[in-house]
Image: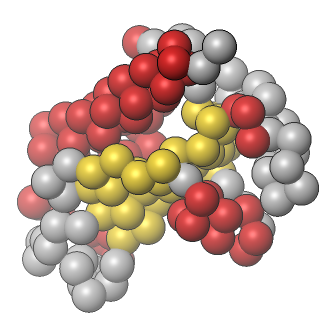
Amino acid sequence: MNIRALKGRSQITTAFRRGKKCASDSLVVHCRTRKHANEPDAPQGGHQDLFIICAVRKKQVPLAVTRNRIKRIVRESVRSFVKANPIVPFMTLAFVWQKPMKHHSEATTREIKPQVDDVLKQAMQYFSGKQEMMP
């Protein structure tokens, strides 16, 4: 499974608007499953790839260095989660960082990775329970 960036205005908008929302203290993720891969606004390769986008608001994190660091750590945390859980039902993951940070030293892997793992575990539990209920 390849992890790729989600590109295209309609695909990004769809990921945020139609995705199932899971949240932790400082992170929200909008997830769409592979069953939506045949829809016209789905990214090409949605059956086998995982598409990620991460948004960090400038009002929450004013320094670009810190915003970029948060995005890198989120992407790396998703890679390690997928490596630990090889079967994931997600096609797109759209992350939104919510916690204000003033300096890039506050953005550490030790703080961000547990948040990512928490929201992805919530989403995995939600989708695994939903698939069990379906006949």
Q: Is residue 88 visible?
A: no
Q: Position of residue 13 (x, y in %)?
A: 64, 70
* Residue at 24% across, 67% down: 98
Location of residue 68 with respect to 74 vertically, above or below: below
- Residue 66 visible in the current orientation: yes
Q: Nearer the viewer, residue 63 or 50?
A: 50
- Residue depicted at 15% across the width and 73% down the height: 100
Query: Nearest the camera: 48 or 4?
Result: 48
Task: Tell whether 135 sits left or right of 17.
Answer: right
Whether 18 is drawn above or below 20: the answer is below
At 65% from the left edge and 51% from the top edge, which residue is drawn?
Answer: 5
What quarter of the picture does the N terminus occupy?
top right
Q: Where is residue 35 drawn, in percent x and y?
A: 73, 33
The front one of 93 and 21 is 21
Quadrant position of residue 107? bottom left
From the viewer's perspective, is 42 left or right of 94?
A: right
Between 90 and 4, which is closer to the camera in this rendering? Answer: 90
Q: Is residue 63 left or right of residue 76?
A: left
